[in-house]
Amino acid sequence: MADYLPGEPSNAYAKRNHDEMLRVRGDAIQAYGTVEQALSILVAHLLNTVDKEAAGIVFFRMTSTWHRNQAIELLINKKFGDRFDAFWHGLPGSPGKPKTSGLMALIRQLDETRNQIVHWTASVNITGPDDQGRFLREDALQPPNIWANTSALRQLKVPDLVEFSRKARFVAGVITQFVIYPKMSGDARNPWHDIFRLPCIYPPSVSHPLAHKPDAPETPPQPSDA
């Protein structure tokens, strides 16, 4: 929940929070679009066609993500057999060891959350007042049935949308690398050789080539010795 900036009036505070929600919601939708573009290119690769436009026509007519994902799974199996099963589908569990999911599970998670981001209703949580008598607000998305029981209401807040975008761009990047992997050579190919034979998990390890790198803290101005 955002704090007031020094001297910020309540209307400016409300607009700043609302604008931030609009920004991250739009960025999340754009990030999901990168996943769809990557999947479209993957389908062209799996069909062994250089005509990405034709593959895109077929891909983007599949409006059901369930059928789309099922088709991709079948094409992967047809092209590669079980060679990359762990990467795409994870590994089964065993006594004392839970199942490890793969990339398809991440894609399905993104599909579900994308629908929530697009169709859920913008709402505002109000708390306070703070020690200066001001009410604090937190913009969020929630299921559109506002008359439902809200005792256990699930919401998507700004940090959730930021994390969704980060996850979507990771998935899009991994899919892209999978497509170009056969053409890699030397040092560029080496890390992906192992990555594509293990379950694709998120968040990835810090050593993963596509792991998120935290923004470096801004360095405050230093006094001049002059």
Image (tube, rainbow, N blue to C red):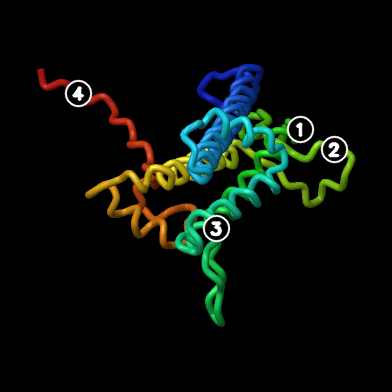
Q: Which residue lies furthest to the right in this view?
A: 147
Q: Amino acid type of disc 1? A: Thr
> What secondary structure is marked by label 4?
loop
Q: In which quarter of the image is the C terminus?
A: top left
Q: Is residue 133 visible?
A: yes
Tag 1–tag 2 contact (CB < 8 Å): yes
- 48 up-or-down from 91: above or below: above
Front in this rendered view, residue 160 or 119: 119
Q: Distance between the residues labelled 1 and 2?
A: 9 Å
> What secondary structure is marked by label 1?
strand
Q: Mark 4 highlights which residue?
A: 223
Say few, some or many: other residues with alpha carbon within 10 Å of mark 3 (under 14 / 14 to 19 / 20 or more). some
Q: Mark 2 highlights which residue?
A: 146
Q: Which residue lies furthest to the left in this view?
A: 226
Q: Mark 3 highlights which residue?
A: 77
Q: Mark 1 highlights which residue?
A: 121
Q: In which quarter of the image is the N terminus?
A: top right
At x 43%, y 44%, the residue is 179
At x 70%, y 48%, the residue is 66
- 178 up-or-down from 57: above or below: below
Q: Residue 11 is drawn in which quadrant?
A: top right
Q: Of label 1 and label 2, which has the lower sequence position?
A: 1
Q: Amino acid type of disc 3? A: Asn
Q: Position of residue 108 (x, y in %)?
A: 63, 50
Q: How far apart are marks 1 and 4 (CA)?
A: 49 Å
Q: Distance between the residues labelled 2 and 3?
A: 43 Å
Q: Position of residue 149 (x, y in %)?
A: 87, 47
Q: Where is residue 164 in the image (x, y as percent from the top left)?
A: 56, 41
Tag 3–tag 4 contact (CB < 8 Å): no
Say few, some or many: other residues with alpha carbon within 10 Å of mark 4 (under 14 / 14 to 19 / 20 or more). few
